[in-house]
Image: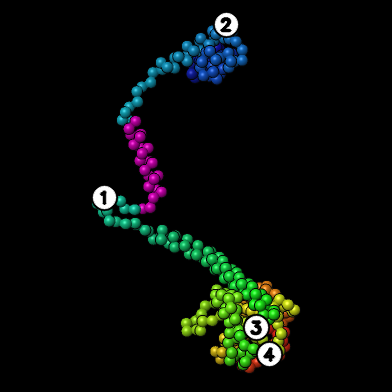
Amino acid sequence: MTERDDSQHGRTLDLSPDDQRLLDALMDAGFDGAKLPASLGRPLSAHDERRLEILTRLLGFMDDYPVEDLDPALLHATLARIDRHEDQLAQRMRFDVAMEKQTPQRGFRIRLPDFVTVAAVLLIAVGVLWPVLGSIRNQAIDAACANNLKRIGYGFDQYANDNNGSMPLAMAGPMGTWETLRNTMNLNPMIQNGYCDAGHLNCPGHHHEVGEEIGPSYSYRWFTPRAVIHWNTGRVTVILGDLNPLVDAARSGWDAPPLSVSVNHGGRGQNVLTSDGATMWLEQPLVGSSDNIWMPNQAAVLRPGVMPSDDADVFLVH
């Protein structure tokens, strides 16, 4: 050890470098002298043993350092303050509920700012989620409608196999005009002979009005007497589709715009089934270059008695 004079603190003793290395090794050995050689990496010399004896004696003085006993009152006061602090933290994480024993029937106390905050959060959540949920619902309806048309297509395929490739007709040919005859009755053989279920002929997006006659919510192609259309052979054409809005409007006595979309899908478009069993989504009721599936090509407005003049003209009626 070396001695130095500090004018502010008096005489002090500093550990020499050898003492510092020996003390560090002793701490690494867990103050176990038997393990000290291994910590130093060499055997202890006589000089080291002397230094070790002095260090051990100095460390022993720490056990005899006078410390006053802790005041029990101070200990209890400190623990009480800690408990109160923890209780305050716990109360901040709870709703403000009246828990006094004198008024056990008091309920939650909701403050106006809290109510406004919750209402604002709910309004924001509804504003964000409602369009998303609406879009998901629309996609599900569109997919279910297309699936119905595919199932009807399977039924057309089986019907054609049993009837020389022809399309179903309940009569030998049309006996009237589109406004006097329910064209979907030509789909009756499909149901009567088990080629499809009645539920497949109803789009899940169509809502029947009160008092409305319950029937298929799809429109079937109007076949002229000379039209020869076979299933899955020859020219591919539209056979079935969502409900024709112009027909319902004309039967009610008013003219709907020619490019109106089906009511089955909320004004977004319509599904159609082609003669090869495929389904298509049309945002406008047009196939090919300009064939409006809601009316004969030569007609500007759907009037009673108008008929397709061309066998290739698509005209869906229900």
CB within 8 Å, label 1 to label 3 = no
Among the two numbered marks 2 and 4 on one chain, the one whose residue lies closer to the N terminus: 2
| Quarter containing the C terminus | bottom right
Q: Which residues are magenta?
A: 75-96
Give the residue drawn at x 31%, y 30%.
73
Q: Single out the residue that lies furthest toward the top.
A: 46
Residue at the disc numbered 3: 221
CB within 8 Å, label 4 to label 1 = no
Instruction: Check disc 1 and report its element: helix, strand or loop.
Output: loop
Residue at the disc numbered 1: 101
Give the residue drawn at x 44%, y 17%.
62
Give me the disc on residue 50. Answer: none
Residue at the disc numbered 4: 225
Find residue 66 and report its horizontal and vertical position in percent.
39, 18
Above or below, comparing residue 20 to residue 226 in the picture:
above
Figure coloring: rainbow
Residue at the disc numbered 2: 46
Instruction: Check disc 4 and report its element: helix, strand or loop.
Output: loop
Find residue 115 and report its horizontal and vertical position in percent.
41, 61
Answer yes or no: is residue 7 visible: no
Real-space Cα separation, disc 3 to disc 2, in angstroms: 115 Å
Give the residue drawn at x 51%, y 19%.
30
**Residue type, mark 2 in image:** Ala
Instruction: Check disc 2 and report its element: helix, strand or loop.
Output: helix
> Majority secondary structure of the magenta segment?
helix
**Residue type, mark 4 in image:** Pro
